[in-house]
């Protein structure tokens, strides 16, 4: 049964919170998600009966192997591990959740980056039994680093398997202190820490009777109360990449030319003055359409079509900018790269670079530093980046780009690199505008 | 000027915007995209999203239906009517033609043609050289689908390799393919069955009549209600009953089952969907129950 049941239609205006879960192998991620779905009534009877009858169950005969709810591939059930990101959906009366369940294996870091790139919040699992002394595993450091690098606004630390350490407050306290120190060293906000047991359901949806010393909320209520403030970047102004030029000839009085794209950063209003980048031409917003509906104002996130008051040369990949601080226009800039491809970065090659709706080619002119995950710092490095490496690089592009720093505006600060030969997505890039950025 | 504040957006607005963004990206970056339209509820939602993405212009892709020949007649009539109303081109390719060519071989004449659709689809992709097939599959439908990217690469054999998917970052989709390969694009990946019905209600979308309550002859088989039709007659010893039902999914007659329901409007269905204890496929599809990985195996073979 869906938890929205009787509360529809009050539930209809709920927002969407996107989560990524991360943890090492066997920390119990899949079990936690299974528990979250089960206890929030996001699991259906036939799914339960399918897992209770599964030939791959690892649970005792009378218990459910909740991990089977999310491990959907044959090889995953066979090996008892998670291979690729699974997306799960559930809704409570408060909001709709999309969970990206990212695998913990180091070789699947690219899947963690995939899940984190669209997430608002990260839930990082720590196995209390394995970290009793407060020593965090390298994977925990890696996941926290990725959450910080990708600019996730909220991090929650789920200290799992508390049942295996006799609900010991001292164990929780040691791990919590270590997690807070980790966050501090990474420059992240202090994370929420929740002691829980996914297996028994303690502190997942319902408060735990076994840990009266924990004063905070269980995981689900915490997730329900996280602010959905994606628009915190409004001082950068409004951004709209032109995805598609809609032309409809009709008779001359009904001829229509509109620029279709998704509003980012802040709202866009009829009458706003817009600058087209990189050309620098200006115009005024004459009309905004969302489907057949005419809007006076479009909110950040709306996929709209804009008509301007005068004809200028605009095509796919151009950026419309209104209000606030303009982006930097440059062909050379610094960025952090998560290298994802098995093929190592080759500085002599050109890669396709996709930023918003703009596709151009780019070369990495210098690798400056590499992130040392276990030491939590950048170290000078001038060799290539290999799969799973994170490094600071200098990039040069064939075309001029309009750029914002990733931390202030993702739509213009994020990009991907695509290998021209294999067509693999080779890297995730985050623009870092500093003193060195120049035209 | 008086300050106008940005309007509040619901989760349906959010889902709609994301889907429109995906449709526009694929239309802009792919050479020969096509939108798969079966007449089912998910593809009806896709068409509505395409209208919002491209009107007043024409759709930058034709519609394609892979016809198993085992359809509910209401759905085919609706399919044709909808394509005509939209003024868009509808291509129909049929499994029956693949059988005639000998590329599809069934053990029995009345076997489910659901899996055979993959062959006909791959033949249509080759015939028209499509490089992107946009479809209405959702990740909440099935556990293998939950693993799939929004833009999902298929090799020249139409195969999906779940262990080697491209990372998919932010809303930056990698649509590049080599000749012979194609991407399957799922703009409504993040929607659930409930979201679909809420959207149908909000947008007042027309659907084939069999989605709503009607009386139909059925037999009870393996815990499901199997429709009794000329293609799927009752078996010996089975009792035919007239039951008030509706379909949660529409597909091949031979493997799609209705559920008991008196829901006559989208609002009624939303109320039922919100409290159902059975998934859409669990309630309606016999062919997903064959083993734990039915869908995954079919997808590896080129199925949608």
Image (tube, rainbow, N blue to C red):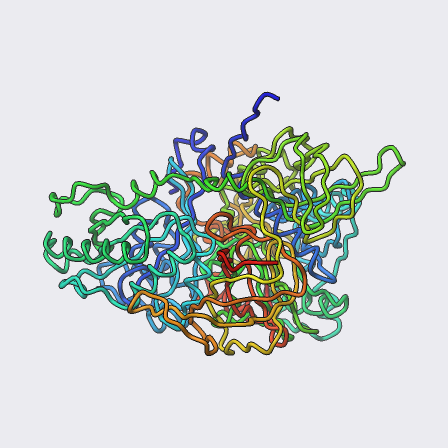
Q: Is residue A277 above or below residue A387?
A: above
Q: Quadrant of the C terminus of chain B?
A: bottom right
Q: Which of the 4 quarters of the picture holds residue B56?
A: top right
Tell me which residue sits at (75%, 71%) in the image: B100
Tell me which residue sits at (19%, 54%) in the image: A176
- Out of B245 and A345, give the one closest to the viewer: A345
- The image position of residue A38, as x and y in percent, is 32, 49
- State whether residue B274 appears in this view: yes
Relative placement, left or right, of A63 versus B197 is: left
Tell me which residue sits at (71%, 52%) in the image: A316
- State whether residue B242 appears in this view: no
- Out of A129 and B104, give the one closest to the viewer: A129
Residue at the farthest right position: A251
Q: Is residue A432 above or below residue B268?
A: below
Q: How many marks?
A: 0
Q: Quadrant of the N terminus of chain B?
A: top right
Q: Is residue A266 above or below residue B189?
A: above
- Out of A202 and A214, give the one closest to the viewer: A214
- The image position of residue B34, as x and y in percent, is 71, 58
- The image position of residue B282, as x and y in percent, is 45, 53
């Amino acid at each position: 049964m869906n938890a929205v049941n009787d509360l529809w239609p009050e539930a209809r205006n709920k927002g969407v919170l996107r989560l990524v879960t991360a943890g090492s192998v066997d920390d119990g991620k899949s079990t936690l998600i299974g528990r979250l779905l089960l206890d929030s009534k996001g699991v259906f009877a036939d799914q339960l009966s399918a897992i209770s009858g599964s030939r791959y169950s690892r649970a005792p005969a009378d218990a459910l192997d909740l991990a089977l709810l999310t491990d959907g591939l044959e090889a995953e059930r066979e090996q008892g591990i998670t291979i690729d990101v699974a997306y799960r959906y559930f809704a409570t009366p408060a909001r709709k959740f999309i969970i990206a369940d990212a695998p913990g294996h180091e070789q699947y870091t690219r899947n963690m980056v995939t899940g984190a790139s669209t997430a608002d919040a990260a839930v990082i699992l720590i196995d209390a039994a394995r970290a009793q002394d407060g020593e965090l595993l390298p994977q925990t450091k890696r996941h926290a680093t990725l959450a910080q690098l990708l600019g996730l606004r909220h991090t929650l630390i789920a200290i799992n398997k508390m049942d295996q350490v006799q609900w010991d407050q001292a164990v929780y306290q040691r791990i919590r202190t270590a997690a807070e120190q980790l966050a501090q060293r990474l420059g992240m906000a202090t994370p929420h820490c929740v002691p829980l047991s996914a297996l028994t359901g303690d502190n997942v949806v319902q408060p735990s009777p076994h840990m009266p010393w924990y004063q905070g909320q269980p995981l689900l209520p915490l997730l329900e109360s996280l602010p959905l403030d994606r628009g915190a970047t409004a001082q950068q102004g409004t951004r709209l990449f032109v995805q598609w030029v809609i032309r409809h000839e009709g008779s001359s009085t009904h001829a229509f030319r509109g620029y279709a794209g998704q509003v980012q950063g802040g709202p866009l209003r009829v009458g706003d003055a817009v600058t087209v980048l990189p050309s620098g031409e200006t115009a005024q917003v004459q009309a905004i359409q969302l489907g057949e509906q005419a809007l006076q104002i479009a909110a950040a996130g709306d996929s709209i079509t804009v008509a301007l008051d005068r004809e200028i040369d605009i095509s796919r990949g151009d950026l419309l900018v209104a209000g606030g601080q303009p982006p930097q226009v440059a062909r050379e800039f610094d960025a952090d790269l998560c290298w994802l491809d098995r093929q190592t970065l080759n500085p002599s090659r050109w890669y396709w670079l996709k930023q918003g709706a703009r596709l151009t080619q780019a070369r990495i002119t210098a690798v400056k530093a590499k992130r040392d995950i276990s030491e939590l710092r950048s170290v000078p490095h001038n060799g290539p980046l290999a799969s799973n490496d994170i490094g600071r690089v200098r990039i040069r592009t064939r075309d001029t780009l309009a750029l914002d720093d990733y931390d202030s505006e993702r739509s213009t600060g994020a990009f991907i690199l695509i290998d021209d030969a294999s067509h693999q997505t080779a890297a995730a890039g985050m623009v870092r505008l500093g003193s060195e950025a120049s035209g | 000027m008086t300050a106008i504040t940005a309007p509040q957006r619901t989760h349906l607005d959010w889902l709609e915007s994301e889907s429109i963004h995906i449709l526009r990206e694929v239309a802009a970056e792919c050479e020969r995209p096509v939108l798969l339209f079966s007449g089912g509820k998910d593809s009806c939602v896709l068409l509505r999203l395409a209208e919002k993405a491209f009107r007043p212009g024409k759709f930058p892709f034709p519609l394609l239906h892979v016809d198993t020949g085992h359809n509910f007649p209401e759905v085919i009539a609706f399919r044709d009517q909808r394509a005509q109303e939209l003024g868009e081109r509808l291509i129909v390719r049929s499994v029956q033609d693949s059988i005639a060519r000998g590329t599809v071989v069934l053990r029995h004449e009345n076997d489910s043609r659901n899996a055979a659709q993959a062959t006909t689809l791959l033949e249509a992709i080759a015939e028209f050289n499509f490089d992107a097939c946009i479809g209405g599959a959702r990740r909440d439908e099935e556990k293998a689908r939950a693993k799939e990217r929004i833009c999902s690469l298929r090799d020249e054999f139409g195969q999906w390799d779940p262990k080697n998917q491209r990372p998919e970052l932010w809303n930056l989709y990698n649509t590049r393919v080599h000749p012979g390969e194609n991407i399957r694009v799922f703009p409504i990946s993040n929607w659930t069955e409930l979201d679909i019905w809420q959207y149908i209600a909000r947008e007042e979308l027309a659907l084939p009549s069999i989605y709503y309550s009607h009386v139909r002859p059925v037999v009870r088989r393996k815990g499901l209600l199997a429709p009794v039709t000329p293609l799927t007659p009752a078996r010996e010893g089975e009792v035919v009953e007239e039951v008030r039902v509706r379909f949660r999914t529409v597909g091949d007659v031979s493997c799609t089952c209705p559920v008991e329901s008196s829901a006559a409007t989208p609002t009624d269905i939303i109320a039922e969907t919100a409290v159902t204890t059975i998934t859409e496929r669990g309630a309606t599809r016999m062919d997903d129950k064959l083993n734990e990985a039915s869908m995954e195996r079919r997808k590896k073979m080129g199925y949608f």
